[in-house]
Image: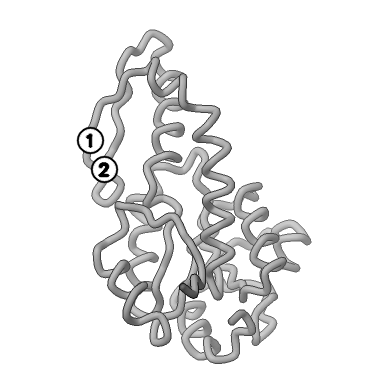
Amino acid sequence: INVRYVLQFGIRHPPEVFLDLIFRENEKPLVYLSYPMTGHEEEYYHRVRDFYNKLSEHFTVLDPGALDDWWVVAEYDNQVAKNPNIKKIKIKHLLDGNEADELEREDIEQATEILRRQLVERDFNLVDVSKAIAVYHYAEGVSAGVVSEMAEAYRTLAAIYLYYPFKRRPSPFMEFYGMQNPSRRTMFKDEDEMIMAMVEEKDYWTKG
């Protein structure tokens, strides 16, 4: 059996993504969506999902937020900070932002360290199998996780596209990684312009 790659596929991806992954990879190559997550949970529902949907019209998009482990840890941190005596943690449904489940605080605390370690390995796995990453940096403060994912993409020769709409320049490392694409464009201030550049340049991506 010739195994091309193994990936951890998030159950909360739309079902069309799984079909694209199996049947349309040549037409819609794999793209990893990178964005600030820590402290930006609400923006996920209002901004990231809209960008994800637009990007998915042209690519098979892997979203690290489609796996529950990160959101379990994030919701735990947020809710315990607000109420140190809380017993049950409410976990929102990722696709629409509605509350879906309640988990015991003690159960989450027992699993937190394992979850934090595995999400780094999992996200790097998704980057490694992708031909490009689209960095949707809607927050001005630099995200260490995003820069780490850009570095991993650079290491594996994936094309990197950076949406960063702010006047203040990002870190030199983010700038450097952000220009690792055929047009050598460092940053995009318009998300639709970035998507069009990706569509026009996908045949020139070097990662096989």
Question: Residue placed at 58% from the left, 73% from the top?
Answer: 188
Up-down relation of residue 93 to residue 167 (above or below): above
Neighbours of disc 2 within 10 Å: few (<14), some (14-19), many (20+): some
Amino acid type at mark 2 = His
Q: Secondary structure at mark 1?
A: strand
Q: To which quarter of the image does residue 149 belong? A: bottom right
Question: Residues at badges 2 and 1 in contact (C-beta under 8 Å)?
Answer: yes
Query: Gap between marks 2 and 1, in whole Å?
Result: 6 Å
| Camera-nearest residue between 40 and 177 | 177
| Camera-nearest residue between 160 and 172 | 160
Question: Residue placed at 49% from the left, 70% from the top?
Answer: 3
Question: Is 101 on the left or on the right of 72, as rendered?
Answer: left
Instruction: Give the position of the C terminus as an image quadrant.
Output: bottom right
Up-down relation of residue 22 to residue 171 (above or below): below
Question: Residue placed at 30% from the left, 18% from the top?
Answer: 88
Q: Which residue is mark 1?
A: 99
Up-down relation of residue 119 to residue 32 (above or below): above
Residue at the outermost top position: 85
Q: Which residue is mark 2?
A: 93
| Camera-nearest residue between 95 and 103 | 103
* Residue 204 drawn at (x, y percent): 59, 90
Residue at the outermost front position: 1
Amino acid type at mark 1 = Glu
Neighbours of disc 1 within 10 Å: few (<14), some (14-19), many (20+): few
Question: Is 17 on the left or on the right of 202, as rendered?
Answer: left
Up-down relation of residue 84 to residue 63 (above or below): above
* Residue 67 drawn at (x, y percent): 39, 47
* Residue 104 drawn at (x, y percent): 32, 19
Q: To which quarter of the image does residue 98 belong? A: top left
